[in-house]
Image (cartoon, helix red, strand yellow):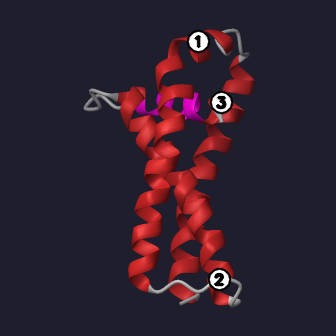
Amino acid sequence: MKYIYLRIYQILKRVKTNDTPALNSLILFVALQAFNILSLIAICNFFKFLRLDKNQTIIFGLSLYTFLLVPNYFFLYRKLEIIIKKYSNEPKEKRQRGSILVISYILLSIIFFFVIGENLH
């Protein structure tokens, strides 16, 4: 978790118009976590393991986002400097590979969420 958050932060830090990369990284990271959990819930809903209508899904999604945001704020956002120090001596090759894996994780999470949402309703 810490590594993914750090990589997202470092990627967003390069965007010149991004004034708050740490906060934006937290928001994106929590959204990705919520996407992954909601994708699993959509699969469960499709196979009748769980029954949620559209309104319940929206309320659940917002509650889930809040539930994920609070601990991530304390364990990631507020400890960003500690996380940066922990991975500061990482070799360039490993850092590049980590960035590629994190970008892949972001893209696959978003694609999977929308594909599941579109096809399993």
Q: Quadrant of the N terminus?
A: top right
Tell me if 54 is positioned left or right of 74 in this view: left
Q: Residue at x 55, y 69 (%)?
A: 113
Residue 93 sits in which quadrant? top right
Q: What residue type is labelled 1?
A: Ile
Task: Identify the residue at image location x=60%, y=78%.
Answer: 42
Cα separation, mark 1 vs mark 3, equals 12 Å
Q: Distance between the residues labelled 3 and 2?
A: 33 Å
Kindly identify which residue carries mark 1: 82
User: Residue at label 3?
Assistant: 3
Q: What element carries label 1?
A: helix
Q: Is residue 81 left or right of residue 89?
A: left
Which of the two residues, 34 or 111, is positioned nearer the viewer here? 34
Q: Kindly state the secondary structure of the residue where label 2 is placed.
A: loop
Q: Mark 1 and mark 2 in contact (Cβ < 8 Å)?
A: no
Say what amino acid the circle numbered 3 marks: Tyr
Q: Which of marks 1 and 3 is nearer the N terminus?
A: 3
User: Mark 1, residues whose alpha carbon is within 10 Å: few (<14), some, or many (≥20)?
Assistant: few
The kind of residue tagged 2 is: Leu
Whether 107 is drawn above or below 10: the answer is below
Mark 2 nearby-residue class (10 Å; few <14, some 14–19, many ≥20) = few
- Are the two marked residues, 1 and 3, in contact with CB atoms closer than 8 angstroms? no
- Residue topped by disc 2: 50
Q: Residue at x 29, y 28 (%)?
A: 16
Please, is residue 72 above or below residue 82 in the view?
A: below
**What residue range appears in magenta?**
5-12
Q: Position of residue 63 (x, y in %)?
A: 44, 59
Label 3 packing within 10 angstroms: few (<14), some (14-19), many (20+): some
